[in-house]
Image (cartoon, rainbow, N blue to C red):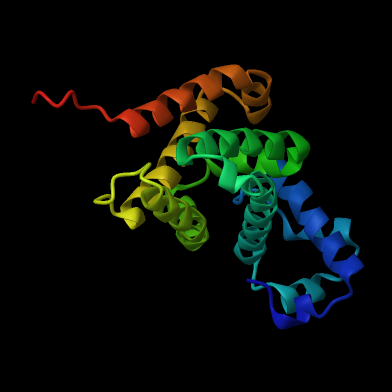
């Protein structure tokens, strides 16, 4: 993560560096991303970069934390109506909010697209750091669902939180293996239909009760 020196910079300068990093990672994989391009676009000396970040992976991680925070802003908009929705309708609204986030923030969406093509070790490292953010979001919702009688009280909310995160990641991964993020956004109905089937399976279960 960035050093305290980075966070002590004037907001305009921090924003300029972040904007340069977003543009670079939206167009290049981590292996091909260039510190030189970031510092040139941000109009800072190369030496200053290393006062703010340990290296390219460090700024890449920071970008992903900013993406996660931005996406959470969209999720919190849905959460404003929390008391009026059950757990599964809420999940459907959160999926729709995720699409609005991608549509409104194309560079961040492009970075998400490229992320699913990164080396497995890179993906695991980034997802590992973000997993606690996801857990902090889903666990209270799952617990609330249990309190309201919508979710079986025997369900382990930590396991369920992991599953929801993994399913969302796997669904996007599946679609991006076949097309680009822009194609996914242009064919949103297909993806929404697919995620709806996943939610129905989670809501109703796979078993018939006869086995």
| Relative depth, front residue between 133 and 83 | 83
Residue appearing at x 66%, y 25% in the figure: 185
Q: How many marks?
A: 0
Q: Is residue 82 left or right of residue 110?
A: left
Q: Is residue 44 visible?
A: no
Figure check: 164 above or below 59: above
On-image quarter of the C terminus: top left
The image shows residue 65 at horizontal and vertical percentages of 63, 59
Residue at the spot 42% in from the left edge and 44% down from the top edge: 164
Outermost left residue: 211
Residue at x-position 59% and y-position 51%: 31
Q: Nearer the viewer, residue 128 or 206?
A: 206
Q: Quadrant of the N terminus?
A: bottom right
Q: Is residue 144 above or below residue 173?
A: below
Q: Is residue 114 above or below residue 68?
A: above
* Residue 203 x %, y %: 36, 32
Q: Nearer the viewer, residue 63 or 78?
A: 78
In the rendered view, does 18 fall on the left or right side of 58? Answer: right
Picture quadrant where residue 93 is located: top right
Q: Would residue 192 appear left or right of 18 to someone viewing this image?
A: left
């Amino acid at each position: 993560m960035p050093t305290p020196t980075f966070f002590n910079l004037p907001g305009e300068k921090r924003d300029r560096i972040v904007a340069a990093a977003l543009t670079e990672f939206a167009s290049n994989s981590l292996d091909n991303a260039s510190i030189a391009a970031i510092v040139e676009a941000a109009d800072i000396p190369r030496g200053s970069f290393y006062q703010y970040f340990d290296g390219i992976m460090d700024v890449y991680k920071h970008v992903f934390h900013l993406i996660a925070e931005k996406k959470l802003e969209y999720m919190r908009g849905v959460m404003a109506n929390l008391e009026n929705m059950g757990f599964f309708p809420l999940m459907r609204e959160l999926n729709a909010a995720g699409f609005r986030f991608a549509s409104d923030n194309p560079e961040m969406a492009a970075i998400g697209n490229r992320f699913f093509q990164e080396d497995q070790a890179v993906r695991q490292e980034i997802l590992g750091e973000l997993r606690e953010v996801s857990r902090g979001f889903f666990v209270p919702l799952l617990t609330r669902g249990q309190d309201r009688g919508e979710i079986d009280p025997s369900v382990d909310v930590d396991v369920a939180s992991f599953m929801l995160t993994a399913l969302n990641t796997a669904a996007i991964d599946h679609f991006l293996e076949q097309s680009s993020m822009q194609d996914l956004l242009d064919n949103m109905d297909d993806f929404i239909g697919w995620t709806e089937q996943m939610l129905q399976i989670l809501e109703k279960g796979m078993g018939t009760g006869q086995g």
